[in-house]
């Protein structure tokens, strides 16, 4: 996990519509950047839907929500459409941003060790500085937690 007080690594990734989005596009706004393992899975769906429900409140507080996973643009589009997600999903199949934000870790599942995305959320201020960082977050609770942090 990256340290609080450090500059958030710059990135440019395609969103669920195939449009390129950069962290710099959001300068002057607070950014909730959350990393999740996979579209359409139970925990990731709970987290995304909760961010969606609270999204108007995030906007009121001057914040945007960006979700990042290694899923494809097409997968993100299906995820957005199925659940009516009002925020941006970024596709990082090469895992460059996932690695830059230090969220690719060894995970144990039924005794098997694999490399995977650890559910992590960063709060980045208007100047691109990481002001909060949470790893191993609880999917269903994370959106309300982040709203409280604002």
Image (spheres, grey):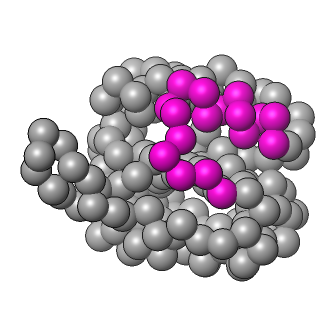
Q: How many marks?
A: 0
Q: Residue at x 50, y 58 (%)?
A: 19
**Residue 90 % position (x, y):** 47, 54
Q: Does 144 lie within the magenta span?
A: yes
Quadrant (top left, top right, bottom left, bottom right) of the C terminus = top right
Give above or below for 27 relative to 56: below
Please state if 150 lies on the left or on the right of 19 as rendered. Answer: right
Q: Range of the magenta residues?
A: 133-149
**Residue 1 % position (x, y):** 54, 66
**Residue 129 % position (x, y):** 77, 71
Of 44 and 76, nearer the camera is 44
Query: Can I make out residue 73 in this image?
Result: no
Please state if 63 lies on the left or on the right of 94 as rendered. Answer: right
Give above or below for 30 relative to 102: above
Query: Can I make out residue 21 in this image?
Result: yes
Of 52 and 102, nearer the camera is 102
**Residue 11 % position (x, y):** 55, 74
Q: Residue at x 81, y 42 (%)?
A: 149
Of 77 and 150, nearer the camera is 150
Q: Residue at x 15, y 56 (%)?
A: 113
Q: Residue at x 81, y 35 (%)?
A: 148
Q: Residue furthest front?
A: 111
Snapshot quadrant of residue 127: bottom right
Give above or below for 7 relative to 102: below
Q: Does 118 lie within the magenta span?
A: no
């Amino acid at each position: 996990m990256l340290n609080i007080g450090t500059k958030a690594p710059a990135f440019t990734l395609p969103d669920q519509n195939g449009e390129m989005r950069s962290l710099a596009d959001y300068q002057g706004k607070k950014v909730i950047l959350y990393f999740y393992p996979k579209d359409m899975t139970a925990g990731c769906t709970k987290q995304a839907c909760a961010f969606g429900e609270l999204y108007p409140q995030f906007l009121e507080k001057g914040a945007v929500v960006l979700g990042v996973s290694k899923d494809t643009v097409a997968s993100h589009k299906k995820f957005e459409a199925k659940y009516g997600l009002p925020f941006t999903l970024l596709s990082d199949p090469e895992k460059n941003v996932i690695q830059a934000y230090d969220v690719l870790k060894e995970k144990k599942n039924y005794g098997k060790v694999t490399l995977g995305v650890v559910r992590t959320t960063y709060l980045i201020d208007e100047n691109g500085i990481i002001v909060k960082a949470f790893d191993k977050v609880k999917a269903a609770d994370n959106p309300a937690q982040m709203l409280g942090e604002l």
